[in-house]
Amino acid sequence: STELSSAIKAFAAGEASLLKQMVAGFQRAVVLIFSARLQAEILQHFKDSDNTDAGFDLAAEEQTLADLSRSCDANACAALAKAEQMARALAGDCSSIRRAMLGLDSIRVMGRVESGRLGAAGAHLAATIDQLDLRHSAIIKRLEMIMELSATIDAGVRRIRALYDPKALRGTVISG
């Protein structure tokens, strides 16, 4: 129980926790998607503008903007894929913790039965089982919170993935 509780704390808290990494990855993906959308708008604005008197090589400038736009799209897609990967890892870790909790439940039930069978001699065992019950309750609360956050983030990443199509952004304008 103590080891499982420590694993959950390391999983959910601290600078290197998967939750913090996933949130950072998700935030990075969102910023990069907006950057890609902005770059697509800049490229389209450049194409639509009359730059004949600009005094620079229009074709080279357009190519540079197009290359930058593709780079932004690639970075956004990669960051989104990483956020999706972290969401799947979080769901997998939650499943592992759930399996460990089932094992802990079995131990607690067998301990209660054994404690009852021993009568007064099982008082120390009953006290230990009571501590397990407390730890179990704390772990369940944390696991439920993590699972809720995981589901929320996974749904958000899937929604962004469904809405984000770099090719569809060409020629669109970001509204304020």
Image (cartoon, grey):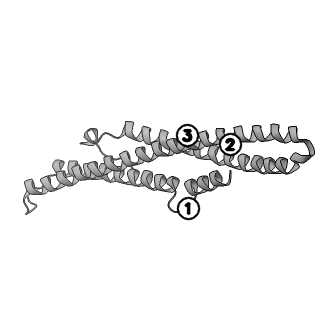
Is residue 78 at all visible to an observer of this figure?
Answer: yes
Across and down, in percent, residue 128 comes to 79, 51
- In the drawing, does residue 148 fall left or right of residue 141? left
Mark 1 and mark 3: span between their CA atoms? Answer: 21 Å
Badge 3 marks a residue whose secondary structure is: helix
- In the drawing, does residue 101 fall left or right of residue 117? left
Check disc 2 and report the residue beneath it: 104
Q: Which amino acid type is marked by label 1?
A: Gly
* Of the pair 127 and 155, the residue shown nearer to us: 127
The disc placed on residue 14 is 1
Q: Which residue is pictured at 82% across the width and 48% down the height?
A: 125
Mark 3 and mark 2: span between their CA atoms? Answer: 14 Å
Q: Earlier in the sequence, mark 3 or mark 2?
A: 3
Q: Which residue is pictured at 65% across the width and 38% down the height?
A: 102
Mark 2 and mark 1: span between their CA atoms? Answer: 25 Å
Q: Which residue is pictured at 65% across the width and 48% down the height?
A: 142
Relative to 154, residue 4 above or below:
below
